[in-house]
Amino acid sequence: MTTLAPPGQARAGLGFTLEGLSLGYGGRAVVREIDLHVVPGEVLVVVGASGSGKSTLLRALAGLLRPDGGSVHADGAEIAGPSAERAMIFQDDGLLPWRTVRRNIELPLRIRKVGRRERAAAARAWIERVGLAGNEDRLPRELSGGMRQRVQLARALVAAPRAVLMDEPFGALDAQTRAQMQRVLLDVLRDTRATVVFVTHDVDEALLLADRVAVLGGQGLRALLDVRDPGDRAGRDVPHLGGHDIDDRAGLRERILKEL
Amino acid sequence: MTARWAIRIASILVAAGLWQVLTATDAVLWLRFDRLPTLDEIAAEAVRRLATPLYALDLAQSLIRILTGFGLATVAGIAAGIALGRSARTRDVLLPLLEALRPIPAIALVPVAILLFPTDEQGIVFITFVAAFFPITVSTRHAVRALPTLWEEAVKTLGGRRGHVLRHVVLPGILPGVFGGLSVGMGVSWICVISAEMISGEFGVGYRTWQSYTLVDYPAVIVGMLTIGLLGWLTSAAVELAGRRVTRWLPRAERRTA
């Protein structure tokens, strides 16, 4: 019944269908009438200026925000609340500060009543995977911003969710740490078939990570652009891009900036 | 560090010395020190008292009363605080009642306690309970409301339900705030247990102190007072220590004020 995810083992990603979706807070509309299909297993990056509703959209996918109108379905079932299938990674401070690195990462397994030994093994593998070996017993306050996001990444993925929702996870990091974290993420995503919805305001980050980019603005969806074939996750690594790809990227970049 | 300790010890010695001078010379400076016992009389009385089984009995009796009342108040106060902080329905039902009762000093409940409970013992514990219950409830409720929603959302998106949120977010997250209430609660508990013992009771440090006064045994009164002070200090230190242990995760600056 419980599914553990030793790194390398994957479950099919979740598909989302948004139909005429309107979202807001206390009657104030943030986005209106959005139609969007998120393909199982793809990495969809949502870009937009601040206030364009990117995070709001993500909260609806997580089940943390009820639609004001329209509907969101995950694999055909209407989203009624948060679920372990849809893990969320927050920009900052999503970790429980009284739990050590190891115990934060074990939390989703603990919630699923996974046995102590299995929990420890899975956590150890993920700590290794995100490069935190040796920091197992440290508290979040003793970690740098980048390390905290590594913990969040491991915690989100340890229970093998079918979708990972990331809300500007690297937004608060310095440029160098951010580049490092993007590499960690790409590395981790290579082995999972989970659907990823990633919110950012950084166009370069979007192009680096995305299979498709959705541009939000003016309370709606401005554009939806294909960046690369979702089957080609291994190719998502900057140094291996050929000259042709770089031309494409420049073109895409300009289009996104124009839509913004 | 040693210099600071020297100052701390000197401060106590000076106060004790002043007491000795004023009482030994039977000073009457509007305040009348002539009727108060000198340090050596107090020390002799303390030595005599400490050797009696009655002293241990009084001590145990007061401690049992305070730990029972305070323990019950901790459980009930935290439960009520969480319910009030998280449920609007509970607020509607309980808050008017609690706010109406809160301004009544617990010690004013002595007549009701005597009428209500079959034994004095239960009445004293009840008063101690009421005294600690309010500060613990209020601080818990505030701590619950001050909890960032982010942690709760994080646990929910990891598959956590209400019980998980309560256990993994609310309970650990409110501890720094709750311990503030526990410290205050412990203080008022002592005030109330001693006062209640002085009014009704057959044993206990408060009862013994008041009895000594009526028997004109003033050195024993002072020994009783010092005993109360020492017990209060020890129990507060225990609460403080426990608080520091369970809130080690707080950033340093916040930890000091918690």
Image: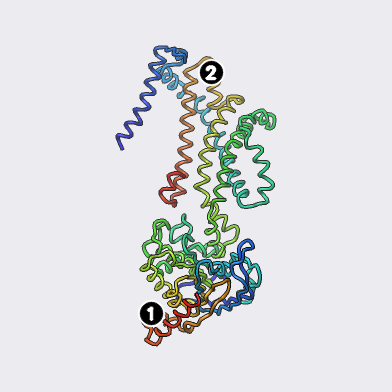
Q: Which circle marks residue A238 in the picture?
A: 1
Is residue A2 visible from the viewing direction of this image?
Answer: yes
Mark 2 and mark 1: Cα distance apart in space: 87 Å
The residue carrying pointer 1 sits among few (fewer than 14), some (14 to 19) or many (20 or more) residues within 10 Å by Cα, namely few
Residue B205: give x, y in percent of width and height: 53, 26
Instruction: Tell me the kind of residue under disc 2.
Output: Tyr
Position above or below: A11 against B209 = below
Residue A148: give x, y in percent of width and height: 42, 62
- Whether labels 2 and 1 belong to a single chain: the reply is no
Q: Residue furthest bottom?
A: A244
Work out whether residue A22 or residue A179 is closer to the camera in this orientation and state it: A22
Marked residue chain, label 2: B
Residue B88: give x, y in percent of width and height: 66, 51
- Residue A141: image quadrant is bottom left
Instruction: Tell me the kind of residue under disc 1.
Output: Val
B60 vs A236, left or right, is: right
The residue carrying pointer 2 sits among few (fewer than 14), some (14 to 19) or many (20 or more) residues within 10 Å by Cα, namely some
- The residue wearing badge 2 is B213
Position above or below: B88 against B45 = below
Q: Residue furthest left?
A: B3
